[in-house]
Image (cartoon, helix red, strand yellow):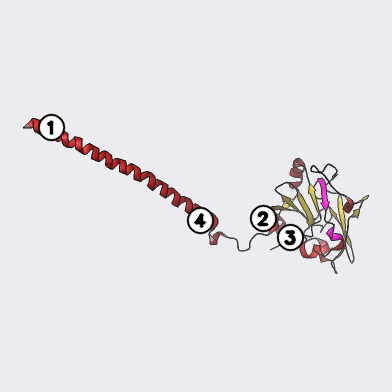
């Protein structure tokens, strides 16, 4: 009798093993499918976070084109008290130079009446830079004069602020000096300069960040 039970138990075990294996295989098939589904749901959630940001994290005022594309620096009282200038540096290394909103010229009665690029021994507006490498560009020091901004009662020299190659000046200001009033930090820029990386690092140390400049001039 005992031998029969042993045989019977063995048969039961043998018949049970395939069932267990079949169940395990089924579970193994379900687990990868479940993992794929979980990963897909996670990726959808992450994509949703990127496309639909948290409203509570958004700034009250969206950044301007200048703030989005440039790092803003300032040269307060450059060479003369009240001659505040900005230097906007693009990711490609080019620097846009212009008058800061706190420049003395904006306080003169009647406002800015003319912009003259004929300073020093040459007319900056007559400089034409050509070629991919801009080899014919003139190299200026940070204190080199770019133009003269005139008001009804005074005139102000605008300088490079950065040492580098002068790529272009904003000739529109000759016929439209009012651009300095309406958009000095955009269409009313003065010039574009390309400094060498080493020269930029030296100049950068002497410039103020936007936050530090606001503190200096007590701007809101």
Residue 148 lies, in percent from the top left, at: 88, 57
Reading the image, the residue beneath label 1 is: 7
Residue 1 lies, in percent from the top left, at: 5, 32
Badge 2 or badge 3: first in the primary sequence: 2
Disc 2 to disc 3, C-alpha distance = 23 Å
Per the rendering, the mark at residue 68 is: 2
Residue 13 placement: quadrant: top left
User: Which residue is at the far top?
Assistant: 3
Q: Are marks 3 and 4 in contact (CB under 8 Å)?
A: no
Reading the image, the residue beneath label 4 is: 48
Reading the image, the residue beneath label 3 is: 217
Badge 3 or badge 4: first in the primary sequence: 4
Per the rendering, the mark at residue 144 is: none
Element type at mark 2: helix
Residue drawn at x 89%, y 60% is 155
Describe residue 30's horizontal placement relative to residue 60 as left or right: left
| Quadrant where the image shows the C terminus | bottom right
Element type at mark 1: helix
Element type at mark 4: helix
Badge 1 or badge 3: first in the primary sequence: 1
Nearer the camera: disc 3 or disc 4: 4
Which segment did they paint magenta? 164-174
Above or below for 198 versus 79: above
């Amino acid at each position: 009798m005992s031998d029969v039970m042993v045989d019977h138990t063995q048969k039961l075990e043998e018949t049970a093993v395939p069932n267990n294996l079949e169940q395990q295989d089924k579970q193994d098939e379900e687990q990868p499918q479940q993992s794929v589904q979980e990963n897909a749901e996670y990726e959808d959630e992450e994509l949703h976070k990127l496309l639909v940001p948290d409203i509570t994290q958004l700034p009250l005022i969206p950044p301007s084109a200048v703030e989005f594309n440039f790092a803003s620096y300032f040269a307060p009282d450059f060479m003369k008290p009240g001659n505040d200038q900005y230097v906007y540096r693009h990711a490609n290394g080019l620097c846009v130079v212009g008058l800061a909103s706190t420049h003395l010229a904006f306080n003169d009665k009647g406002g800015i009446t003319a912009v003259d690029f004929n300073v020093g021994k040459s007319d900056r507006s007559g400089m034409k830079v050509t070629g991919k490498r801009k080899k014919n560009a003139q190299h200026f020091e940070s204190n080199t004069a770019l133009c003269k901004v005139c008001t009804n009662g005074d005139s102000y020299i605008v300088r490079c602020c950065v040492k580098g190659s002068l790529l272009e000046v904003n000739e529109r200001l000759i016929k439209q000096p009012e651009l300095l009033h309406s958009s000095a930090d955009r269409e009313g820029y003065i010039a574009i300069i390309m400094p060498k990386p080493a020269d930029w690092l030296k100049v950068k140390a002497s410039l103020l960040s936007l936050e530090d400049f606001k503190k200096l001039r007590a701007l809101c």
